[in-house]
């Protein structure tokens, strides 16, 4: 796993408790926090964007979600933003981080703040496909088989340690992730709307795991890395626990619903209206095509990855308060959107080359439209 952060980590700076900056009137003095360069030179342009079009109720509701999640989770603002982008795009997220960085807590807090249903499945070597999708159960009273829904019938399904279950069970999620339905005994059953999979995996322990196949990895919209907290953030975590914080009781922590499915639906419609110039479409294609010819990669990004980068850049632009996409939006989402869709050559792995480093070089070399 690369140690690089999510590309938009610095886009809004670090705010205590995970709170987003409050949208301000444009006539007021600008916030002293200036846009900062990202890891690979992508200009973080969202600082001023949040002060534009502040009256949009759907956007304001989603921005408030970060403040609510921050009541339970410290120092993971970029991951929360990534989860919001995934919900806006209707895509799935692969969360990678060592144990104990609040992956499960983040998903639970996010679903609470968005008034969405969530279910957690612990993926183990003996988990069967029917344990995820559901199965037919014989009813002795009616002498008929009835379908019993599995945990996939929810809004946010937390697939904990997804790489610990065999490929057969992993494959049971493919139809759900792509078609938003489950087929059992020849009958297709639609999943709730919205529906996303938030899957976690441990990057440091590979014994007894089954690497996700490329076909399944490509169905994840984003791969987000959850780093260990900084010293001040870790002190805040300990302080909260010393004051009685219980991660199993989000209500006591003050996490409350501030948005709902209707806000999300309205926001998705607004994101679809964000304008993208033809030059930016060419820019996205040039980045994707460059991954296919990079000497360090044996597998480049597919056209599905190009559409994913387009959609996430649109969502990020909308969250930033703009009705158009900029090259900086594309750069900001390139790493989390593409890092899991490429494969390093064995010799590159032996040389200690990281995927994010190669992607950073590509972003630096592809001409930016002016």
Image (cartoon, rainbow, N blue to C red):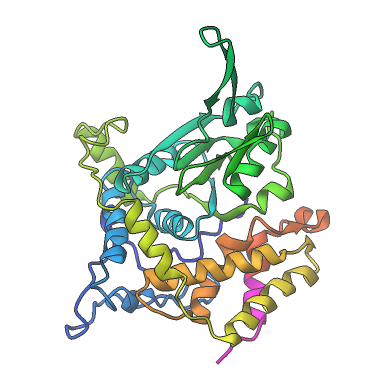
Residue at (41, 37) in percent of width and height: 118
Picture quadrant where residue 27 is located: bottom left
Residue at the far top in the pictured view: 140
In which quadrant is the C terminus drawn? bottom right
Residue at (53, 54) in percent of width and height: 91
Q: Is residue 11 something one can see in this rendering?
A: no
Which residue is nearer to you in this view: 290 or 17?
Answer: 290
Which residue is nearer to you in this view: 154 or 100?
Answer: 154
Vertical placement of residue 62 versus 55, above or below: above
All told, the count of numbered labels is 0
Please tell me whether residue 32 belongs to the stretch shown in magenta.
no
Position in image of residue 361 (x %, y %): 66, 73
Vertical placement of residue 80 versus 329, above or below: above
Position in image of residue 145 (x %, y %): 59, 17
* 206 on left or right of 251: right
Q: Is residue 153 something one can see in this rendering?
A: yes
Residue at (44, 60) in percent of width and height: 88
Vertical placement of residue 232 versus 7, above or below: above
Position in image of residue 14 (x %, y %): 33, 62
Picture quadrant where residue 176 is located: top right
Which residues make up the magenta segment?
360-370
Position in image of residue 181 (x %, y %): 58, 42
Please tell me whether residue 365 belongs to the stretch shown in magenta.
yes
Residue at (45, 33) in percent of width and height: 119
Which residue is nearer to you in this view: 347 or 133?
Answer: 133
Residue at the far left in the pictured view: 28
* 97 on left or right of 114: right
């Amino acid at each position: 796993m690369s140690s690089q952060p999510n590309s938009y980590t610095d886009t809004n700076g670090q705010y205590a408790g995970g709170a987003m900056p409050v949208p301000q009137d444009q006539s007021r003095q600008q916030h002293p926090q200036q846009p900062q360069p990202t890891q690979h030179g992508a200009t973080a342009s969202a600082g001023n964007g949040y002060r534009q079009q502040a009256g949009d109720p759907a956007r304001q509701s989603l921005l408030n979600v970060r403040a609510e999640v921050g009541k339970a989770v410290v120092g993971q603002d970029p991951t929360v933003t990534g989860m919001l982008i995934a919900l806006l795009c209707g895509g799935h997220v692969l969360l990678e981080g060592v144990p104990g960085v609040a992956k499960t807590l983040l998903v639970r807090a996010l679903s609470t703040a968005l008034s969405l249903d969530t279910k957690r499945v612990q993926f183990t070597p003996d988990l069967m496909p029917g344990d995820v999708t559901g199965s037919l159960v014989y009813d002795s009273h009616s002498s008929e088989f009835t379908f019993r829904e599995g945990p996939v019938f929810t809004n946010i399904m937390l697939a904990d340690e997804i790489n610990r279950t065999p490929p057969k069970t992993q494959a049971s999620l493919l139809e759900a992730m792509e078609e938003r339905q489950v087929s059992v005994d020849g009958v297709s059953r639609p999943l709730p709307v919205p529906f996303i999979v938030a899957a976690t995996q441990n990057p440091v322990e590979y014994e007894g795991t089954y690497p996700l196949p490329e076909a399944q990895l490509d169905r994840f919209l984003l791969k987000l890395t959850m780093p260990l907290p900084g010293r001040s953030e870790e002190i805040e975590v300990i302080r909260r626990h010393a004051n009685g914080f219980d991660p199993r009781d989000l209500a006591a922590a003050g996490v409350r619903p501030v948005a709902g499915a209707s806000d999300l639906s309205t926001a998705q419609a607004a994101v679809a209206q964000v304008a993208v110039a033809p030059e930016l479409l060419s820019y996205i294609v040039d980045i994707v095509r460059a991954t296919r010819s990079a000497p360090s990669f044996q597998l480049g990004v597919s056209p599905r990855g190009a559409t994913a980068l387009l959609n996430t850049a649109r969502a990020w632009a909308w969250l930033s308060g703009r009705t158009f996409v900029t090259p900086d939006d594309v750069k900001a989402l390139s790493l989390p959107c593409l890092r899991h869709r490429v494969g390093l050559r064995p010799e590159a792995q032996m040389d200690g080359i990281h995927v994010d480093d190669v992607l950073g070089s590509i972003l630096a070399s592809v001409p930016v439209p002016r």
